[in-house]
Image: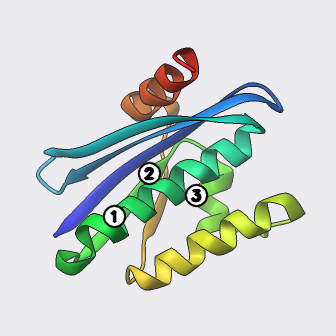
Amino acid sequence: MKLIIFTDGASRGNPGHASYGFTISNEDGKLLHESGKYIGIATNNVAEYMAVLEALKYVKEKYSKDLRSIELFADSKLVAEQLSGRYKVKSAHLKPLIGSIKILVLELGGVLFTHVPRAKNAEADRLANLALDSR
């Protein structure tokens, strides 16, 4: 099975009240799961990485047996580039989060990270903002 994941983080203030959202679909575009959660006070970058981490944790729990490949799309260029290894991680507070994500990536057999414009990430953005609004 090939999975397509869209992730987004939101923060009102930086740091401020923060949340994440993600969707998981199969390669035919059928929505398999969606989630959004308020995470407390955090920076936007932390919220973006939490979205990736929680999406991959869900995939590992529910789909790892039948998994062929994973494509993950994020509207944060920093997230896509750092997780792809093209940008270095300089922020010490992000290193533990990124380390946890990298372990999951290895356990899942790899993930292709791609940056997308915000307009192509509307559903994950909606879920993150819904979680923020309903805290």
- SS assignment at label 2: strand
Q: Amino acid at mark 3?
A: Ala
Q: Earlier in the sequence, mark 1 or mark 2?
A: 1
Residue 10 horizontal side relative to residue 34, left or right: right
Residue 125 horizontal side relative to residue 26, left or right: right
Q: Which mark is residue 59?
A: 1
Residue that mark 3 sits on: 80
Residue that mark 2 sits on: 73
Q: Which mark is residue 11?
A: none
Is there CB contact under 8 Å for labels 2 and 3?
Answer: yes
Which residue is rendered at x = 78% and y = 68% of the image? 95
Mark 2–mark 3 distance (CA, rounded to whole Å):
8 Å
Q: Amino acid at mark 2?
A: Phe
Q: Is residue 65 visible?
A: yes
- SS assignment at label 1: helix
Q: Residues within 10 Å of mark 3 (few under 14, many from 20)?
A: many
Q: Depth check: 57 or 126 in front?
A: 57
Q: Position of residue 5 (x, y in %)?
A: 36, 52
- Extreme residue toward the top, this view: 133
